[in-house]
Amino acid sequence: MKHQQLLQHHQLKATPQRIAIIELMHHAGHISIDDLYRDIREKFASISLATLYKNVHSMMSVNLIREVKISGQKAKYEIEKMPHAHVVCKACGELKDIAFDPAVLMQETIRESDYAAEEVSIVISGICPQCQKI
Amino acid sequence: MKHQQLLQHHQLKATPQRIAIIELMHHAGHISIDDLYRDIREKFASISLATLYKNVHSMMSVNLIREVKISGQKAKYEIEKMPHAHVVCKACGELKDIAFDPAVLMQETIRESDYAAEEVSIVISGICPQCQKI
DNA sequence: GTATTTGCAAATGATTTGCAGTGCT
DNA sequence: AGCACTGCAAATCATTTGCAAATAC
């Protein structure tokens, strides 16, 4: 079981609830707490929102997942993966990844601010191809 | 009065509360609703949080100010200005601007995703020079 | 003069907490 | 066995709404 090990490698116990969270997140790409709650109840009718919040926090604190904050929407969560940027549609709300190498940006940051840069979060908003047609 | 006109050019009535919001935002660079509330009460002891929320929303809807969402913090607000990126310190929470031209990133977005890119939000997190010393 | 805005209080919505029972390793 | 995790209910915190009085233009 791949997801089980993913949790254990991050020193979190592999409960079925957590495995389901990772499965859903992996499948959706990005998911909000509410959608996660709606979907996960199909497997765990009795899971509580509190458990989701707690688990999302513990997974974030070990960098297994990452929070994507978007203006005008509730936060979404994704499994930690290769650096990338996000595009979000202002019309329909769709969120997707695009390839982007943040190396240059991090260099620039260090040069300009002396910060020890660790993470980069990029959200580009605009209108998706579908909504442009309407 | 510069701020008065700024409001009027965006078709918002120049109430003293709004002018004070812009003054504080201009002075702070980036400010959260709570800090804004704390500071603005020195001038308007009776201002309500509801008024702040309403004004922040109306100013956002005319693009006079912009929301900066940061993982692990409450949103901050800034006056709309030249495109730039943000660096935030994971230790002390300090937020500052750094110069960054998003043109390349927007081109890339269009090429990769066919989105009509309108806005770019960049938040780089790391450790600020002060906190590195500790 | 009129439409907008303010400030209050109350409603709503989101997230966190405490705790007893359960389950992973 | 032992500690971490779950689920519930309640507490807390954040944001929005409705409305009457005040104010910008």
Image (tube, coloured by chain):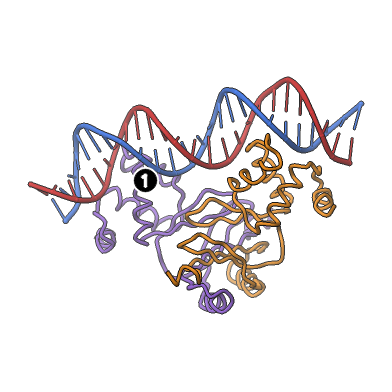
Chain colours: A orange, B purple, C red, D blue
Judge left or right: residue B132 versus residue B27: right
Where is D5 relative to A125, above or below?
Answer: above
Q: Position of residue B125 (x, y in %)?
A: 62, 59
Q: Which chain letter goes with mark 1?
A: B
Q: Position of residue B115 (x, y in %)?
A: 51, 72
Residue drawn where x is 67% and y is 46% of the image: A56
Q: Position of residue B131 (x, y in %)?
A: 65, 55
Where is A91 relative to A48, above or below?
Answer: below
- Which residue in the protein does label 1 denote? B52
Q: Secondary structure at mark 1?
A: helix
Q: Residues within 10 Å of mark 1 (few under 14, many from 20)?
A: some
Query: Which amino acid does the dot numbered 1 rest on?
Result: Leu
Q: Quadrant of residue C19?
A: top right
Residue drawn where x is 56% and y is 49% of the image: B73
Observer-nearest residue: B83 or A73? A73
Residue drawn where x is 64% and y is 75% of the image: A104
- Name the quarter where the C terminus of chain A is drawn: bottom left
Observer-nearest residue: C18 or D19? D19
Q: Quadrant of residue B14?
A: bottom left
Numbered circles on residues, count: 1
Judge left or right: residue B119 versus residue A78: left
Q: Quadrant of residue A50?
A: top right
Q: Position of residue A6 (x, y in %)?
A: 81, 53
Observer-nearest residue: A61 or A4? A4
Observer-nearest residue: B50 or A32? A32
